[in-house]
Image (tube, rainbow, N blue to C red):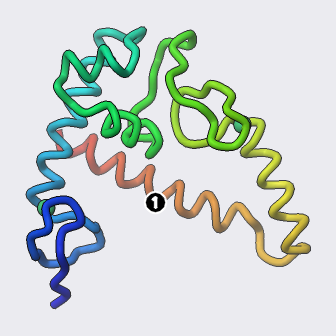
Amino acid sequence: MDIRNCSNCGKIYNYDGFNICIQCRRDEEKLFQKVKEYLRENPGAAIPEISEETEVESSKIIEFLRQGRLEVKDANNLILECERCEAPIRTGRFCDKCMVEMDREFKGSIGGGRDPRDLGSGDFKRKLRAGERYRKRR
Ligand SMILES: [Zn+2]
Ligand SMILES: [Zn+2]
């Protein structure tokens, strides 16, 4: 058994691959659904508005967006910035242009070793799968 402290509430829990306990995960899932619902009904909403209406901290909303779990459907509502070039993006951490560039740079620096997509998208796919699990649970 692997007992750890929840990085959110500090309680000990049975580690099962997540760094927060199951109770916090449930709470977070509730917040996530709230934000998701709100964004579906108000695709043009900005983060402060979403935060006010859903009572979810804006840092949490940004976290959901960064994780790629939330996506703003309105093409004009770009509330996140690319962490690399600060271009407005709808979800995740980087814009498409930077993703391509980083992929290329990574390939160059490793020098034809392993495919950089293995590293980058492996993580991304895991997150996608986690996202699917969330969706299926509803
Ligand atoms: Zn917890
Ligand atoms: Zn960028």
In the rendered view, would you say 35 is above or below 63?
above
Residue extending farthest to the bottom is: 1
Return the residue at label 1: 126
Q: Is mark 1 within 8 Å of ligand 1?
A: no
Helix, strand or loop at mark 1: helix
In the rendered view, would you say 48 is above or below 111?
above
Can you tell me which quadrant of the image ligand 1 is in?
Answer: bottom left
Q: Is residue 50 left or right of residue 34?
A: right
How many discs appear?
A: 1
Q: Is residue 76 left or right of residue 87?
A: left
Q: Position of residue 137 (x, y in %)?
A: 18, 45
Q: Position of residue 90 (x, y in %)?
A: 54, 27
Residue at image coords 54%, 19%? 78
| Residue 53 falls in image quadrant | top left
In the rendered view, would you say 118 is above or below 3?
above
Q: Is residue 60 left or right of residue 26?
A: right
User: Is 120 or 89 nearer to us in this picture?
Assistant: 89
| Residue 37 falls in image quadrant | top left
Residue at image coords 17%, 38%? 138
Residue at image coords 51%, 33%? 91
User: Is 1 or 6 nearer to us in this picture?
Assistant: 6
Question: Amino acid under label 1?
Answer: Arg
Residue at image coords 19%, 80%? 4
Name the quadrant of the N terminus.
Answer: bottom left
| Residue 60 falls in image quadrant | top left
Q: Position of residue 80 (x, y in %)?
A: 53, 29
Q: Residues within 10 Å of mark 1 (few under 14, many from 20)?
A: few
Q: Position of residue 112 (x, y in %)?
A: 89, 73
